Amino acid sequence: MLEAKTFVDAARARGVGLWTGVPCSYLQPFINHVIGDDSLIYVPASNEGDAVSIAAGYELGGGLAVAMMQNSGLGNAVNPLTSLAHTHQIPLLLIVTLRGEPGGPADEPQHALMGAITTQMLSLMDIPWAYFPGNADEVEPCLDQAMAWIENERRPYCLVMRKGAVAPCAAPEPAPVRIPLPPAEADRLPAQLHATRQQMLQAVQQQLKPRDVVLATTGYTGRELYALDDRAQQLYLVGAMGCASSVGLGLALARPDLRVIVLDGDGAMLMRLGALAAIGYMAPRNLLHVLLDNGLHESTGGQGTVSHSVQLGNVALACGYAGKLVITQPGELVTLLQGTPAGPFLVRALIGAGVPDGLPRPAVTPDFVTRRLRQYIADISQEQTA
């Protein structure tokens, strides 16, 4: 197992000056070390394509950068890798984790296909790759090989990281909150948040009506909702980070007779922030968008997001949402759900960090949950025509 500092120092000696990416649990110790080193520049990208683009821009300015991502997000980076880095011959070093490795450790179902085709995708994009070094003796020759390609071919090179490649590293202190708007215009962010994700999810379930459908974003949100009470009217997305709101938009447009409640996370929303524009433009009155915002990528390592520096409620309004509300207490969510605010409506629920002890993973498969929800909606249609 490799200490993160060993690799980072060797990369810095070879000219790497900026690190950017999207967290993965495999990358957690690695990113923690980079964030905690004040001599390094770390840019928390909202999605993997942005990470590649940030790294490319840094290289155009005379530096060399590393873009880090989970293999499930590699698809998000295909466009800038092929049409920007390849076409313009802009080199960068990629670190892509190998979730769902064939024959490797057990993993979530959404990683199975991607784990089998990750290296094939890299080869198809004409990106040479090697496995991330597993010990200190392998670091120098590994980086020498990568830098030789980068210097000679002027195109990206990828290191594929397996589980447990890097030794644990404690998380650094959270970055300071930057509020870009004057206080009078900004969402009020309390110094301490005591409400938990679980309490907010309980508030949602307490007020669910038969004609409500709930879509939960991937990670702890779906797992906690399932653990509280598994219901046929609930869908737990796995993978597809940031896509819950777009799924909700399609469903809301298809079934305007249902109330569609999207349970989102701040990291996921930032990853696909453009989805707000499509939702605002289509303006489904039956869409309630609940953002559970703790300022963290808590499901994938606990690194901070930039949500507290973004007025997400104002962004939603600018995109065409009918209204917004910032809350800190579950009771406020209960009151809102008892009514029917015209949508699309964004509820920004500011919560603290933390996960319930012994949180189970769903015992139901994603395809089963999807079929079950489809049947639930079909049954409601039959009741209407009866």
Image (tube, rainbow, N blue to C red):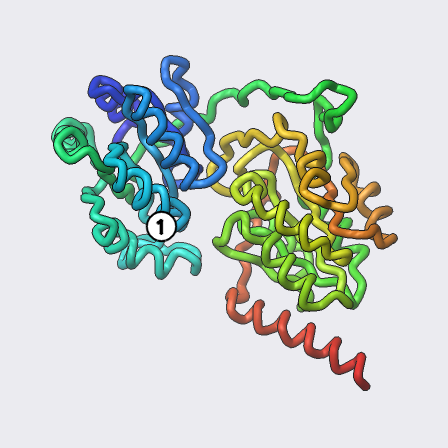
Q: Residue at x 72, y 78 (%)?
A: 379
Q: Is residue 237 above or below residue 12?
A: below
> Residue 26, can we see it?
yes
Is 215 or 329 nearer to us in this picture?
Answer: 215
Q: Is residue 249 depicted above or below 155 in this figure?
A: below
Question: Label 1 neighbourhood size at 10 Å, few (<14), some (14-19), many (20+)?
Answer: many
Q: Farthest top residue?
A: 39
Residue 342: x percent and y percent? 82, 52
Residue type of the residue flagged with mark 1: Arg
Q: Quadrant of the C terminus?
A: bottom right
Give the residue at mark 1: 99
Identify which residue, 134 or 259, lies in the foreground. Answer: 259
Q: For the view shown, which residue lies furthest in the bottom direction? A: 386
Q: Quadrant of residue 22?
A: top left
- The quadrant of the image that shows the N terminus is top left
Estimate the x, y position of residue 105 in percent, counting from the top left: 33, 53
Q: Is residue 340 left or right of residue 114?
A: right
Please give the name of the residue rendered at 13% of the width and 29% of the height, measured from the top-left corner: 144
Labels in figure, total: 1
In the image, taking residue 178 as reference, residue 90 lies left or right, namely left
Q: Residue at x 75, y 76 (%)?
A: 380
Tell me if residue 15 comes above or below residue 162 in the rendering.
Answer: above
- Could you say which is closer to the camera, residue 146 or residue 54? 54
The one of 367 and 58 positioned closer to us in this rendering: 58
Q: Secondary structure at mark 1?
A: loop
Residue at image position (37%, 60%) is 112
Residue 151, picture quadrant: top left
Q: Position of residue 7 (x, y in %)?
A: 25, 26
